[in-house]
Structure formats: C-alpha cells, structure tokens
Amino acid sequence: MAHHLPPSDLPVPSAVRTWREALQLYLQPACLRMLALGFAAGLPLLLVLGTLSFRLREAGIDRSTIGYLSWVGLAYGVKWMWAPLVDRLPIPGLTRHLGRRRSWLLLSQTVIAGGLVGMALNDPSQLLGPLVACALAVAIASATQDIALDAYRIESAEAHAQAALAASYQTGYRLAMIWAGAGVLWVAAWAQGEQATGYVQSAWQAAYLVMALSMLPGMWVVLASPEPVPAPFAPARNLAEWLKGAVVEPFADFWRRYRWQAVLLLALIAVYRISDVVMGIMANPFYVDMGFTKTEVASVTKVYGVIMTLVGAFVGGVLSARWGVMRVLMLGAALSAASNMLFVWLSGVGHDVQALVWVISADNLASGIASAAFIAYLSSLTNISYSATQYALLSSMMLLLPKFIAGFSGDFVDAHGYASFFTATAWLGLPVLLLVALASRVHAKET
C-alpha cells in the first residue's frame, strides 16, 4: 500500500522567525522534492518544440513540415480534456502500490523517457514518421505529468507552504528549460566535434539520450517520496458532474460576471501572445539558415535570452505596480510586435553574433514585460471560487489559436521569405493593441 504524506512537512509561518530560517525552508524535503519534479516537468517541452525544430532544419526537413509538426504542442493546450481521467482513474498494478498521484507521475515520466530514447534513435533525415510519433507521445505524457504534478503539489502541503513549493517547482522548471534548450545543443556540438558541419545523427542521438537520462532523478524522487493524503471524492461525483464543476461552471461564472464584455476579454486572451508564438516556431530554423552554430544559438538565445526574459518579467512587474496592469499590457503588446521587426533587420545582416545579441536582448526583454503584465491580468479576471480552474482554462486558451496559426508559418516563409514573415508577425500585433484599448475602457468603468 502507498505510504502517505502528513498534511505538511514544512514548518508553519509562526516557526519561521529569521531570514536564515525562511531560506532554510527551501532545504526542507518537500521543497527539494518539488525542485526535482519541476525539473522533470520543464524538460520535455523544448525537446518536442524549439530544440526539435533546430534539429529538423539541420537535417534538411523543409520549413513547411516543421511548421505543421509544431502542432504536437497543442497537447499542452487541451490537457484539461483528460484531466478527469488522471484525477480519478487508477492504473492497474501501479496505483495500489504507489497511490493515485505517484502512479500517474511515474507512468508519464516513463513514457517521456522512452519517447526521448525513441527520438534519439530515429534519424529524421532518413524517415520522419517514427520520430514524430515519439514526439507526440512525449508531448501527451508531458501534459499528463503536468496534471498529476499540479495535484501532487497542492495536496502535498497546506496553504502556508504552497508559496515555497511553487517557487521550488518554478526554479526546477526554469533550470530544465535551460538544460533542454542550451544543454542539448552543447552536448550535440561536443559530440559532433569541431570539424564536422551540417547534420550528424550520432551527435543528436547522444544529446537526446542524455536528455532521456535527465528524467531519471524525477523518477527516483517519485519512487522515494510519500504519497500525499488523497482528497476524498463525494460518492455522487461522476464524470458529467466533474466536467460541470471543472469546465462548465468556471466558464459560466465568467460569462455571468462580464456578460457581453466576456467576448472581448476572451478574444484578447486568445490573441495577446500571437506575435511571439507564431514567430517563435520559425526562430530556430531561421538561425540554422543564417548559419549560426549550435553553440552560438545555445549561449545567446537559450541562456542569455532566458536571463533577459527574467529581467523583462521583473521590469514588467515593477511597471505594473507603478502604472497599473492595463498600461503595461499595452506596452508589452506594442514592444512584442515591434521587436519582431528586428528579425527583419537580422535576416538582412546574416550571420553576425553581435547583431543576434542585440535582437535577442530587445525581443526577450519585450517578451518578459508582456508575460508579466499578461499573467497579472489573467489572475485579475478569475473568481476566487474558481481561481485555479479558470486560470488553467484561460492560460491554455491563450495558446490554442496562436499555436494553430503557427503551424502554417513554414508555408509562409517558403512562399515569401523570412523578412516578409517577420513583418507579418509584427502586423499580427495590431489587432491586439485595439483589443487592449477596448479592454482598458471596460477595466476603467469597473474601477
């Protein structure tokens, strides 16, 4: 039988009296567990999206195909559809020994690791189908892991400990994003050697096998950790009632509160990040076509770029507190669209690392500001009674339309070239500015 975690193994706030004790919270077992599990959650995302697009372009796969393959990322946007199964369905042979949350975590992590091994062993330059099937399996398993991990984190500790757990989770997630973005390119570059150029399957095979091995600490933590005390289900709670409570009611509440204005707000949520998301799918193929090396892309876009995004998020948070969320929402939308025009300039400059640094500085700073304001805005729209559910639904909705449109980005680049594509993604930001202006008027009337 599964052994259960007490309500919390973190000290209550009254026991934390000094800064040192506050920092020591993060060395508690619960936070260290969440650090490792956050790493396992953040690892697969780029390996089936951004990093994969770099590998495919280097292997000579046409941009049109790369664009359509980005649709595997839609799994993250519709994961709420199978959340009730993860929440309730026992896994034969596993749930009895590990418990409800850990059994789903271990199953999803095993599929992720196996899928990454499959992606390592299959050569896309020879046959693309098996690698795509493995990537889809990794994406679905990764989205499933997210569902189980959110529930595990919430059930693992009481409210006073959630902030520390969430911070540990986010730290692990960010470290994994750097490892899956920059680390995999560094490993592939090292395995390829200085002399070899172009696509070398053995180098990418080594890199993806290292990524598969990087899932092992998370799996070990799942096996070594206690199962949280399960939340009891009401006897009458069937699937239809779950869907009503988890999907229908949160949306109905949103419509009741905002009435006709809900259409405007949902439209803004659906398109706010459209410039960034549509452009982002073709970013790595663009770097390959411009002649940038794996090491250059890893260092500038994946490490330095992440730092600039975090700086932007900090700036966005400070500006939101000073000017209000709506003004910064407008600023973020304008900067995100305008910064895409810098890629038009870069496409003319060609292979110039210093130029790439300037473009990434501006683009990621703008992205960080926009993200911080958008997260604050989404949070302000939710009802406290449905906060988690509404936020999850709204945040997944914000990616569906942009990711769908992004699938056609390769066709556009093939037909019109990179400069026209980046210009078009900047123009996509214009309707967003109009929607922010209209939403600001709604916001002004309510406050």
Image (tube, rainbow, N blue to C red):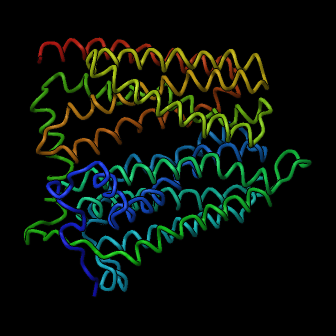
**In this picture, residue 279 sits left or right of residue 260:** right
How many numbered discs, if any?
0
The residue lying toward the viewer, choosing from 182 and 128, is 182
Residue farthest along the right direction in this orientation: 195
**Viewer can see residue 137:** yes
Tell me, yes or no, if residue 130 can be seen here.
Answer: no
- Residue lying at 62% horizontally and 17% vertically, measured from the top left: 342
With respect to residue 150, does 52 lie above or below? above
Between 206 and 17, the one lying in front of the other is 17
* Relative to 166, 249 lies left or right: left
Q: Where does the image place residue 327, in percent across and percent down from the top left?
A: 31, 14
Q: Is residue 181 left or right of residue 120?
A: left
Q: Where is residue 382 shown, x and y percent of the image?
A: 18, 36
Q: Say if 346 sits above or below 155 in the image.
A: above
In percent of width and height, residue 64 lies at 66, 37
Residue 97 vs 419, above or below: the answer is below
Query: Which part of the image, by quadrant, shows the N terminus?
Result: bottom left
Residue visible at 45% across and 29% down in the picture: 368
Expressed as whole percent of the image width and height from the top left, the position of residue 211 reads: 62, 61
State the residue in front, 216 or 163.
Answer: 163
In terms of image quadrants, where is residue 425?
top right
Q: Could you say which is closer to the camera, residue 372 or residue 243?
A: 372
Residue lying at 34% horizontally and 78% vertically, measured from the top left:
91
Quadrant of the drawing holding the C terminus: top left
